[in-house]
Image (cartoon, rainbow, N blue to C red):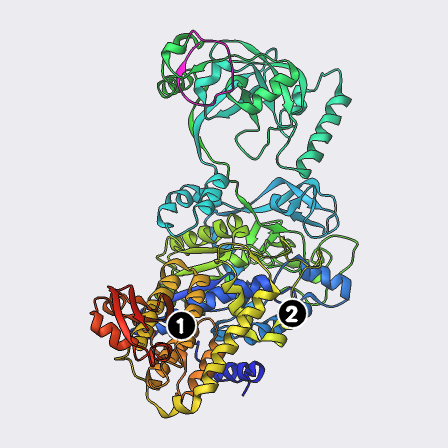
Amino acid sequence: MAYNFDSIELQWQERWQREGTFCASGDTARPKYYCLEMFPYPSGKIHMGHVRNYSIGDVIARYKKMRGFEVLHPMGWDSLGLPAENAAKERGIHPQEWTLSNIGTMREQLKRMGFGYDWDREVTTCLPEYYRWNQYIFIKMFEKGLAYKKASEVNWCPECQTVLANEQVENGTCWRCEAHVETRNLEQWFLRITDYADALLDDHGDLGKWPPQVLLMQQNWIGKSAGAMVRFPVAGTGIKIDIFTTRLDTIFGCTFFALSVKHPLVGALLADHPDREGAEAFIREVESDRLSSREETEKKGFFTGKYAVNPFNGEQVPIWLANFVLMDYGTGAIMSVPAHDSRDFEFAARYNLAVREVIVPTVETAAQLTITKVSSDKGFLIQSGPYSGLSSDEAIQRMGDYLAQNELGELRTMIRLRDWGVSRQRYWGTPIPIVYCERCGIVPEKLESLPVLLPKDVEFSYEGGSPLEKHPSFKQTACPKCGAPARRETDTMDTFFDSSWYFFRYCGRHEALPFDPREASSWMPVDLYIGGIEHAILHLIYARFFCKLFRDFGWTDQKEPFPHLLTQGMVTLGGSKMSKSKGNVVDPNALIEQYGADTARLFVLFAAPPEKSLEWSDKGVEGCHRFLQRVWAFYERRHQELLATPAKQSSESTSGQALLVSLHETIKKVGEDIEDRFKLNTAIAAMMEFFNHLSANEDALSDEIGLLRHALEMLLKLLNPFTPHFSNELWSRLGHRGLLENEAWPDFDQDLIDMQMVNVMIQINGKVRDKLVVVPGLTEEEISGKAQELEKVRQHLQGKTVLKIIYVADKLLSYVVK
């Protein structure tokens, strides 16, 4: 009978659901394992990137379950955000209707793939039962001074009518609608993530199982730098400009000053400039370029006409506005040392500014003042007044003392990280639970009044602005403190807030807290977190921040939520990432209809290591399908014998012993590839290789059906995490009533593996006629006896006289006959 994957897969999915196979219980003596993939945005349908990510996690979760762990493997929906609001405008439906419909579709798709999720713990962030806890957390942060409001310059999309993070601006346009992005100054709510900057960096030591590039990306994003704050007076004015430098030792090499066009003192510096129109045109050009690209290829500047005074030697240096200086790091002003900074050197060369070398590799090279290349290395100072001859480190310390003693600055550590702006001017998000009262000021909503619900009767139009701002009954409220008429906050939260703690919610619900601390203490931390490297910075930093925040609130004892991170590669077609806009999307539904879910799972796991990109191949899919069909056909050929014969785990024959060695080597490799290396592709290759061995020796082992049954059963156990429907079906057809998920993972016999088999070639008159696979060390008589049992050898020896036998131990047995 052919392998009818469609009916078979549905049958096993129904049984898993009926028996609650993947429902996690915290009340168990078994060790726990929390396996988690980043939850999806419900955009409508799952794509091959989802299939790959979730197939990886499902293999690990099923494997751990067979290893005897109590496994938590949940799924949910990151379901708030702008796309649903845009869909409401385009389709004339409410965002909730669109979102919940998409969730229903995607949930069924995930179930059809056979992923073993605990659906009883499903989380949907757009439902009040979830976002009320966003509001609860926000209020707790507000009470501790960790949430505050201030005016801030933001990226503004005029089409979406909302604030965008820097990462959401692509080449000067909105990442979603591609409208040209503007800058505006708005009152925004912020979270003090900078209070946790040191902990976020210091605790990298607990993340030894993270990809090094992810840790580096986070280090660079936080950007902690030891340096000095230095105050430069502006000649002829009362203005003073602070700069931060990590290389105070180079200050005598400062030959010009550079400011961001957004620096607050730009207006004062340009107040009497003769070319104000030129200055304003330059500022507009820089702002346009900033939104188009974060990395400038050409350094540009505008001379302010003013000069800064070096506090160490009194030298006056020209002050320029420069397109390469940004306000999001340091003070938005820099002292420029072109001899020791390639960016400054490029600018100096363009505008013919002085270049002065003040650092050399050794004291002996101090006389060599010809600059051959820009060097940013530390060394020894020259042309630096009383500090000449000192090493960089010693000079920095002495210069820092000088600054402090003369109230000109101080040594200081600076971070690049800025507080997290969470305000969004849109509807489909968590309402910020704040009320503005003329008497009481800014007042949080009462905890017992949560959730502040999103009103259903809103109008969505392209006129702009948040629907909440235009909704009188939502906006107008009473002060929670004094009861007087008040105004409700109409901004909603950045959806990164939702995804920063959902993994705690999976652990268990609680009536009075966002999650059950007792259950969280059992399940947390997440033992393996799987997701794309595109989330290396924002999501993962925010999630780590919330974990530390919850620890300080006394809700958890965890420092880090994800000690082990696996970043899977993307799925490509023709070398490009699959996307609807490129028309290169492979539909998982069509793939399942043609080949079945197990084939789809097997291919996305076999085609490449998890961390590498996977290039889609129709031939590769067909090859995986053929492999399953071959295993099925093997069972069909022998099913009556297999059913009638109990499994046997030993053999006296050479072929049987060789098969057992191969089986135990395969068990060892598959387990190690899953457990230690996540090399799921090589685990699958090992199983395919073993089945080739089994097939090639099927006839030779036709008298050892018990051994064949044992080999097939072990192969099905190994395959189960990868192809669970297929494996369970054949397992049941072998007469087993239980689920493979409840079977123990097979053990390997290292002593048997160490007993390496050898190939002894059998020649007759110089031609190889067959071979023996035997344990090493057999005598000539033992090998000759086994050889003459081989059919091909018997045929060529029949009627012949053996003149001579030549035996090379463990390699060759040669008959000379006539």
Q: Say left or right for 334 vs 457.
A: left
421 and 792: which is toward the camera? 792
Residue 212 counted in the magenta span: no
Q: Which of the 4 quarters of the picture holds residue 124?
A: bottom right
The numbered disc on residue 622 is none
Q: Where does the image place residue 677, in percent across and percent down from the top left?
A: 39, 58
Task: Give the residue type that dot 1 points to.
Answer: His
Q: Where does the image place residue 604, in percent across and percent down from the top left?
A: 53, 64
| Quadrant for the N terminus in the image | bottom right
Secondary element at image label 2:
helix
Pointer 2 and pointer 1: residues touching (CB < 8 Å)?
A: no
| Quadrant for the C terminus in the image | bottom left
Task: State whether residue 621 appears in this view.
Answer: yes
Task: Give the residue type that dot 2 points to.
Answer: Asn
Q: Say left or right for 106 vs 398.
A: right
Q: Residue at image x 62%, y 37%?
A: 294
Residue 370 counted in the magenta span: yes
Q: Say left or right for 150 vs 250.
A: right
Q: Residue at image x 46%, y 12%?
A: 312
Point out the stretch of residues depicted in magenta. 367-382
Compare marks 2 and 1 and give the one earlier in the sequence: 2
Question: Closer to us: mark 2 or mark 1?
Answer: 1
197 and 669: which is toward the camera? 669
Task: State whether residue 510 appears in this view.
Answer: no
786 and 140: which is toward the camera? 786
505 and 379: which is toward the camera? 379
Q: Where does the image place residue 477, in percent across and percent down from the top left?
A: 64, 59
The numbered disc on residue 102 is 2
- The residue labelled by disc 1 is 693
Q: CA gap, disc 2 to disc 1?
A: 46 Å
